[in-house]
């Protein structure tokens, strides 16, 4: 985890870090908490297959992932997931079934963000006609038993997909 060199409030170099999530300035008592970010992903079931995406940007550009993203402030996990899927795949999600959550580390521009990744599944009646190519390089449709889990961008996704496969 990157550390502050100077207090963002008073400019002091007398910053202490609790080795978990809290930065505190001894000069002015400013406290900054690096809390866990909430991320959401969905296993989209189309007929007997699962829709995966290939990431078109860092981190882990070119690797497999599930569609989803980060939950914005004042959003529920479900609303954040529906927004992300509408933005990325231009489809409206129907019923969501919660699968579980797993911790993850999302490295972005040399900062390690701790996340809690929440996984859902949902059925879709048709494949997306167009998708956001700034986020997604390619759509991949595979049978659950043929998913190349070693190619996933994030370990939490691999665990979430394994949980789904064990339940079907």
Image (tube, rainbow, N blue to C red):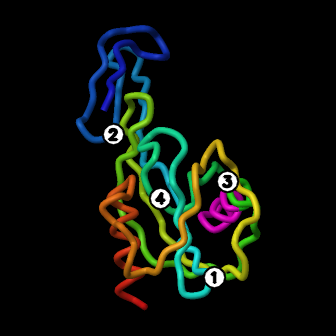
**Relative to 21, 11 lies left or right:** right
In front: 152, or 16?
Answer: 152
Residue at the limit of the structure toward the bottom, as seen here: 168
**Relative to 79, 103 lies left or right:** left
Main secondary structure of the magenta stretch: helix
**Where the C terminus falls, by quadrant?**
bottom left
Element under disc 2 = loop
For discs 2 and 1, the disc positioned in front in the rendered view: 1
Disc 2 from disc 1: Cα separation: 38 Å
Label whose residue precedes the other's in the sequence (2 or 1): 2
Residue picked out by circle 1: 123
Residue picked out by circle 4: 65
Residue picked out by circle 3: 74
- Look at the numbered discs 2 and 1 and tell me whether their residues touch, using CB distance below 8 Å: no
Q: Residue at x 38, y 28 (%)?
A: 110
Decide: is 125 above or below 168.
Answer: above
């Amino acid at each position: 985890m990157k550390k502050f060199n100077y207090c963002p409030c008073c400019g002091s170099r007398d910053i202490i870090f609790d080795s978990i999530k809290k930065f505190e300035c001894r000069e002015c008592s400013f406290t900054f908490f690096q809390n866990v970010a909430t991320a959401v992903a969905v296993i989209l079931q189309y007929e007997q297959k699962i829709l995966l995406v290939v990431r078109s940007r860092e981190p882990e550009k070119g690797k497999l992932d599930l569609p989803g993203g980060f939950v914005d402030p004042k959003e529920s996990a479900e609303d954040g997931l529906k927004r992300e899927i509408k933005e990325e795949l231009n489809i409206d999600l129907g019923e969501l079934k919660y699968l579980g959550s797993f911790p993850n580390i999302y490295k972005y521009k040399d900062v390690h963000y701790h996340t809690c990744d929440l996984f859902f599944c949902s059925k879709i009646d048709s494949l997306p006609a167009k998708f956001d190519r700034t986020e997604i390089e390619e759509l991949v449709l595979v049978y659950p038993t043929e998913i190349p889990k070693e190619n996933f961008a994030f370990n939490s996704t691999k665990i979430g997909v394994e949980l789904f496969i064990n339940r079907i």
